[in-house]
Amino acid sequence: MKLGKFAGIPALAPVSRKAGSLATTNETYLENSGKMELLDSNKFTSVVADLLRQNKIPGLSIAVVHNNEIASRGYGVASYEDNIPCTGDTLFDIASSSKSLTAASVALLVDDKKHPEVQYEALMSDLLPDDFVMQEKMYTDSITVEDVLSHRTGMARHDSSCMGPSAIHPDNAKSITRNLRNLKVAAPVRSRYLYCNHMFTVASHLVEEVSKQSFSDFLDERIFAPLNMKSTTLQPSSAHSKGWRNRMAKGYIWEDNGWRGLDPQDCPEGQGAGSIISSANDFIKWVKALLYHEEPITNRVYQGLTKMRSIVNPNSRRLKAHTTPANYTAGMEVYFYRENMVIGHDGNIPGFSSRFIFMPDRKFGAVVMGNSTGAGSAATTIMRMLMDEVLEILFEDRLLQMAIGPKQKEPRKPLMNQIKPKHQKDLLPKDERLGQFKEQSESQSIQQNHTTKMRQNSKDIKKEKDKATPRRFGQKEGEKLKNDSKSSPQGISLEAYVGSYWNAGYHTLTVLIQDGQLFIDATDRSMGFTMTFEHFKDQAECIANLKDNVELTDSPVNAKFVFGAEKALMMGLDLEPVIKEMIWFRRCSDALE
């Protein structure tokens, strides 16, 4: 099968490389090859251009491997302000796509005869007796290594409990593990799939304790070095220290008809769940190793990583065409597309999205990385195009299901008119800034060549917070608020609510008065936020407006205060709806009020 069924495909020569470049001596990185023409076809380039435009994506990097050949291509820009093109060597925060590497790290320990105690069926509490303690003993005595790696521990996400690097007491992998004893579970062990970032951070702590190495060093020594992944590392600061800052893509969020840029941030409390920095050219080596069982991926390691363990979407009523429900393995998902097995994972954090897949029976794999949240839906479309090409599906039988948003019937606007910076006056003149975005024919569009001039340089979601919208007090599930559901007036002085409140798992939250409203600043959390309270009823029930610190999105959260004689003694917040009860914070006796 050739990755090029479309007409008008130009012939391209191999990319020249300087000494010390990213490719290994027995591999040739091509912008295109006889079997990889699709990335350069007019039709594919036109589709990518539409995806960039409609999903508000500054840049994408794509790499594919098929029958031992690798090709890559960049589209758009890695940095909008600096007009740096996106190439196969551009570095991205790949977010939860990192989980496959965490699972592989554990799999290597399982395969290592020096550590016979580490097995998929081993109890986590046996391996980490002091650290791995759940809130209920039955969970401590039941959860195994493979439960942790397949999201079937019954633990809720509790993402808001993590303290970020700016906190007075920041979290790390060990503290995240030890805090499990303070967090409520949501389901029995192995009863359902519940995505939990914490557990992959716990897995990274297991790797550190068993190997007596930092997680970063273990990855470098056991995975990255054997695969010659010289442009992959843990945490953005590590990429900076290696001199990669100028190769690092900037993340973007589209708001108010402009892009707001943000740089990837270190997230030590999330190691194992994310925070791997890599390029499409480098990460495709990892995909290729999985596909061909290359060192260090032995057959036993591969079988352990790809064993199906939990059903991701058992009640799904809306599957994509020709696609089965997904099963989670260990750090990856498995589903079938047109009766062919597909294995992979995606990753989403504010400003960045990634996705990788491989088809074991077709010896095909692909990586897509982008510097906006919208790149996630674009990656899904691109993967379907690539898989249809590999499967040699007739063009008229393909269902591309373009992820181009709801306004498809509007006249197509020139790309330059849609992608403007948030603060244009502070940037370069438009012609200089958007040289590669000027109006072109579809055959030219916004494609950027995979170049040998490597630009040396450097947190799951879309925040990966799949919280349901909280209900107002007295509102039944699925029931709309009645027209007469009105808030009662605030009667008690706001001073009665002010103070610091503590929960063992969620630590301290301090209620202040700001602009005449109760206010909480929790921006020192890993997924930082603020809360502004609106009184609802009985001087105790409130709706707290939770604003994400990065994406600046709002979501209502049920809140409740319990009063003593003169002031509030407890505060309840519906921060984790899946556990179906509030997180209760008790007023600190020594708080400064």
Image: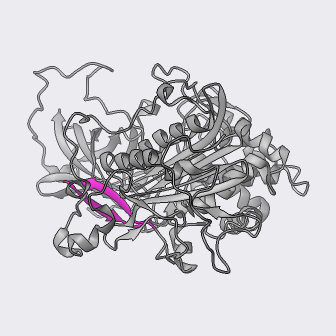
Residue 19 vertical placement versus 63 (above, below): below
Could you say which is closer to the camera, residue 488 or residue 310? 310
Name the residue at 56% across, 61% down. 12
Against 25, is 144 above or below? above
Left or right? Give the position of 337 relative to 298.
Answer: left
Was residue 256 drawn as part of the magenta stretch in this picture? yes
Q: Is residue 141 visible?
A: no
**Above or below — where is 27 with respect to 586?**
below
**Residue 335 relative to residue 469: left or right:** right
Q: Range of the magenta residues?
A: 249-264
Q: Nearer the viewer, residue 235 or 468?
A: 235
**Percent of width and height locating residue 458:** 49, 72
Magenta segment main secondary structure: strand
Q: Determine if the magenta segment contains residue 538.
A: no
The foreground one among 566 and 134 is 134
Q: Position of residue 145 (x, y in %)?
A: 73, 43
Q: Nearer the viewer, residue 227 or 8?
A: 8
Colour logic: one colour
Q: Where is residue 576 in the image (x, y as percent from the top left)?
A: 42, 38
Find residue 550 and report its horizontal and vertical position in percent: 33, 57
Left of 545 or right of it: where is 191? right
Residue lying farthest to the right in this orientation: 113
> How many numbered marks are there?
0
Q: Quadrant of the C terminus?
A: bottom left
Quadrant containing the N terminus is top right
Q: What residue is shown at x 26% (from left), y 54% (from top)?
A: 415
Q: Which residue is drawn at 23% across and 64% down?
A: 421
The answer to whether residue 453 is visible is yes
